[in-house]
Image (spheres, rainbow, N blue to C red):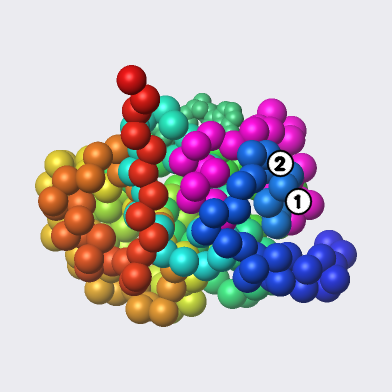
Amino acid sequence: LELNRKELNELETRCKSLVIDSDFERFDELPLSKLTLEGLQKSNYVEMTEIQRKALPLALNGGDVLGAAKTGSGKTLAFLIPLIETLYRREWSQMDGLGGLVIAPTRELAVQIFEVLRKIGRRHSLSAGLVIGGKDLQVEQERINRMNILICTPGRLLQHMDQTASFNCDNLQVLVLDEADRILDMGFEKTVNAIIDNLPKERQTLLFSATQTNSVKDLARLSLRDPHYVSVHEES
Ligand code: ADP
Ligand code: MG
């Protein structure tokens, strides 16, 4: 794969100069790699939803984001795009190991996120895997270290942290907590806290939730650093 130094430098500069009130409406107005733009186009994603318009410039700029918007508002792309782009701009390769981690409350949600990642990331050479349990632990243990991006459920991820000696998160760049309210409602608070304890402090964290409960705010305090708050309210 041809490495486009000029494109990477230009993306880096444009991402650094993104401002909070940047008024973009379409994905192709954002500083995104050609590979991601092609993936989005092929999946018929052209105009951004409101949560994407608000969260993407902040996340591409490198900040932590706490995002709240109801189900169906397009939160998945609001975190997958920055995750892919950060690894791409840092020239992430097979050898660099785990760079992006997404935690979702259920297997079904993890699978859905994985499918979106496969669609929009199809032109990238990053490897990605699901860690959701229900399958042979040993098979996962053999594969888990070859992945640049993992989409996980909390219990299974912590199991690997405890039991898979070779599992290494030291290089992690981006952590995503999706549906944080549901993760907590399902009783995963301690599990998620233990996971976060195992991750490098120097990272970007994106936390998305349908609602902003007090327990979500507590988790945000533990996992995010100077977060930008973005929320989309329903119009009446
Ligand atoms: P949420 O996570 O907020 O519940 P999703 O990310 O699952 O929402 O997106 C909900 C639906 O909207 C999905 O079918 C997705 O393909 C679609 N969608 C998301 N963003 C866009 C967009 N920018 N343009 C068109 N459809 C979109
Ligand atoms: Mg979602």
The amino acid marked with disc number 1 is: Leu
Say left or right for 228 vs 148: left
Circle 2: element type: helix
Circle 2 Cα neighbour tier, 10 Å, few/some/many (<14 / 14–19 / ≥20): many
Residue placed most toward the observer, 53 or 145: 53
Point out the stretch of residues depicted in magenta: 33-57
Prevailing secondary structure of the magenta residues = helix
The amino acid marked with disc number 2 is: Gly
Q: Residue furthest top?
A: 236
**Contact (CB < 8 A) between labels 1 and 2?**
yes
Q: Residue 90: percent from the left, percent from the top?
A: 65, 72
Residue placed most toward the observer, 154 or 61: 61
- Kindly report the distance in space between the C-alpha atoms of the residues bearing marks 1 and 2: 6 Å
Residue placed most toward the observer, 217 or 115: 217
Q: Is residue 235 visible?
A: yes
Question: Which residue, given by chain and number where applicable, does mark 1 sit on?
Answer: 35
Position of residue 65 relative to residue 107, above or below, is below
Q: Is residue 133 visible?
A: no
Q: Residue 115: percent from the left, percent from the top?
A: 54, 36
Q: Which mark is residue 39?
A: 2
